[in-house]
Amino acid sequence: MTMTIGPRIIKTGLAVTLALYICAAVGLDPAIFAGVAAILTVQPSIYRTWKQMLDQIVTNTIGAAVALFFIYYLGDNPITIGFVIMLVISLSLKLKMESTIPLTLVTVLAIMSAPGNEDIMFTINRFLIILIGVGSAMTVNLVVLPPKYTKNYMEKIHSTFQTMSLLLRTAVSNEMSEKAYQDQSKELKTSIEKLESQFKVFDEERGKLGKLNQTNAREIVVFKQMLKTLQEGEQLLENIDEHYFQSNTTDEENLLFDRHIEELTKCHEYLLLKYQGKMKDQELLVDDALEKSGEFFDQVINIYSHDKEQKLRLMIITSSVIDYTFQLIRLNKLIDHYLK
């Protein structure tokens, strides 16, 4: 088993270390709460860490104030602590800051469960410790290993396409073993879900922190279309798996679908390489592959017209093929617009 240590793991470790050192330097104790705050604040993007820090300050201030109020009037017995926990959770949800709930509850417990909590300076001490942890996470995320969004996204696009390409090239011919096909399908689904999350972070970062991210807005549109095209390819695979082999296709029909999907897959691969400037101008190759979709559709219509009952499922797959083709055409246009 290989152990992967990514940027976020490194940042989390550094943020905890920084928080503990700062607490030691200024004499704040127990520093462990600063470490917990740093762990809970590190996010996959600069914007999310910044937003998390602001939200943490708001909800932790509320949590500390509520805890101090109830300690003064009702004491720090377990029933009071439980009630305060419920109240703070409700307030965080009301403010739509649910991601801050774990750390806010740590703050409440840190204040209410320790001796001497009636003293206002004790509450301030605990609150400052939490803020040091939050600030350390933000500092590390800004300075250490800033995310390389474009590079990471394109690497994920290519690896996801390779998985999808293998599945598309073998879906109709049924050359892969059932176990291998299912494993690859699960991997593809997981990869696309990760890409969706990555794009959301990517677009969020550009939109909210434009000055920190020089990504061209047109490039974002291309990236979104790359994701959409992969999603459409995955949908095609799902339709083939669900409907194709129940259609009682002939060898000739199998060859028709297999060859056309192969052409579209080659076109998809070419477009990704074209975006990166790795291919010579071969627009005729793209145009030819995409124009063949009309011929393909006519042939499928002919097959369906001769046996509508048995071949109805093929129309579902054909519709998905057309959708995939449409996304490829759109991707090609957007890449041309971006490169020019």
Image: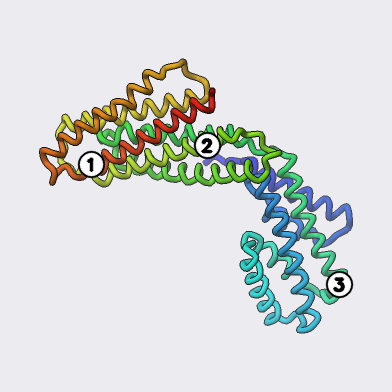
How far across and down, in percent of the image, does residue 21 sit?
Answer: 82, 50
From what the image shows, is residue 98 above or below residue 187?
A: below
Q: Circle 1 sits in a helix, a strand or a loop, which is it?
A: helix
Secondary structure under the numbered disc 2 in the rendered image = helix
Which sits in the foreground, 236 or 11? 236
- At x 79%, y 58%, the residue is 31
Position above or below: 49 against 333 = below
Residue 51's place in the image compared with 211, above or below, is: below
Question: Which kind of residue does numbered mark 2 sit on?
Answer: Val
- Around disc 3, counting alpha carbons within 10 Å, would you say few (fewer than 14), some (14 to 19), or many (20 or more)? few
Q: Position of residue 177 (x, y in %)?
A: 29, 38
Query: Could you say whether the residue bearing mark 3 is in a helix, strand or loop?
Result: helix
Q: Residue at x 73, y 64 (%)?
A: 60
Q: Is residue 340 above or below residue 173?
A: above
Whole-percent x, y for residue 215 in the image: 62, 34
Q: Which residue is mark 2?
A: 221
Circle 1 is placed at which residue position?
Answer: 315
Q: Is residue 258 left or right of residue 274?
A: left
Question: What residue is disc 3 on?
Answer: 120
